[in-house]
Amino acid sequence: MCGVFVLLILALLAASPWLWRWYRARQEWEQGQSALGGYDLAAAATHLDNYLQLRPEDADGWFLAARTARRLQRIPEAERYLEQCQQLRGVTDATRLEWDLLRVQQGEITGIDTRLRQTIGPDHPDALIVLEALARGYTRVERLADARQACDLWIAKQPEHPWPWLWRGGLYERLSYLDKAYPDYQRAVQNAPTNREARLALGGLLLRQRQASAATEHFEAVLRQSPDDIPAQIGLAACRIEQGKAGQAIPVLDHLLELAPASAQALFLRGKAALEQDQPAQAEHWLREAVRLAPDDPEALYQLSQAVRAQQREAEAAQLTRQLEQLRKDQLRLDELLRAIARKADDPKPRHEAGVIALRIGRTEDGLRWLNSLLLLKGDHRETHAVLAEYYLRKGDQERAAYHRQLAETH
């Protein structure tokens, strides 16, 4: 009997490395699933990577890791994982769908979205994943009405999820429908009180509406979880200034500018705080840099004009005021164009004009997105290629300038 017991102990010891790896793998898998259920994709990706270190032969693990990486916009990583999944299991309907979603999410919409809508019905197990990718892709190519519809369908199927409310709120805010954005952001926070993006979005909207006390709650909630979160610190500093407590904001902003000296928002707020404390010369220094980094920010330009005027330089202040008036006209026109794009996504004229205006006023990322989205939808568009050729020539990118100039001249 004693000999049997000894043999059992020896067998367990021999198997213990395998048992330990099995136990660790199971833990990582379960924690990854839990993170996905809590809408924490970054944590889920980490757990899934750990799982695959222990179970590299699991095709399901590679597939879920690929899908999670795609949802995090880590496209090259998602492609590698999906290829590994196919090496283990071959091409399946699931991997074909995932390749489609990879393309859709990057803005390659035409044709694929129609096929997905025809083949993935509301009761399909991947219906929500498809709606998520469509919402991202439609937003990328400025098909905002379609993006909103995808969010509407997602909300109807899964009203407890925070993202469709958050994303739809973002679409409304971009179109300046703040009264519609507010309840959507509220619902996103209600669904996921610890969600950073939802808190920052709601806090930012409340601050934009001059409700600093209400906004403070959301920035502080983010900082309780992540004390070094820079956007939350900037938001809280903006609330303090709005509340007439510039002295409380200054140490925070000085620290932020040590960490991120090129933060246009921090520079603007530091200048505004100095102006609040009757230090126009110091304010001008920070505000000029803020305007240089963010020439599309009318509030920074306004505060700079005030700092210059406070130093009795009326002619310069008047010039800044005229510049501000033109910027506001351009931004009002952009709002009109965005609504036109939302109403008729396939009309190239508003996209082109929006891109031109955005580049002119310094909203470079938006301008390039609108112009490139037009090319994605329409293929070749000579006027857009001409604008892009001029832009890249100014930036010193001769190769891209030549590419767009050739297309502008030959089509």
Image (cartoon, rainbow, N blue to C red):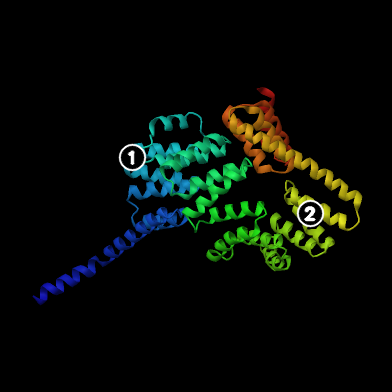
Which residue: 44% across, 36% down?
A: 100
Q: Amino acid at mark 2?
A: Gln
- What residue is shown with label 2? 303
User: Which element carries disc 1, helix, strand or loop?
Assistant: loop
Secondary element at image label 2: helix
Q: Which of these two is toward me, 62 or 226?
A: 226
Quadrant for the C terminus in the image:
top right
Amino acid type of disc 1?
Gly
Camera-side residue: 207 or 87? 207
* In front: label 1 or label 2: 2
Question: Is residue 362 in sight in this rendering?
Answer: yes
Label 1: which residue? Answer: 90
User: For the image shown, how many numbered marks are present on the structure?
Assistant: 2
* Residue 199 percent across, percent down from the top left: 55, 56
Up-down: is 123 above or below 4? above
Q: Which residue lies at the image location 66% right of the left edge and 28% below the top edge?
A: 349
- Tell me: 294 left or right of 375: right
x, y percent for residue 10: 19, 71
On the image, which quarter does residue 380 sit in? top right
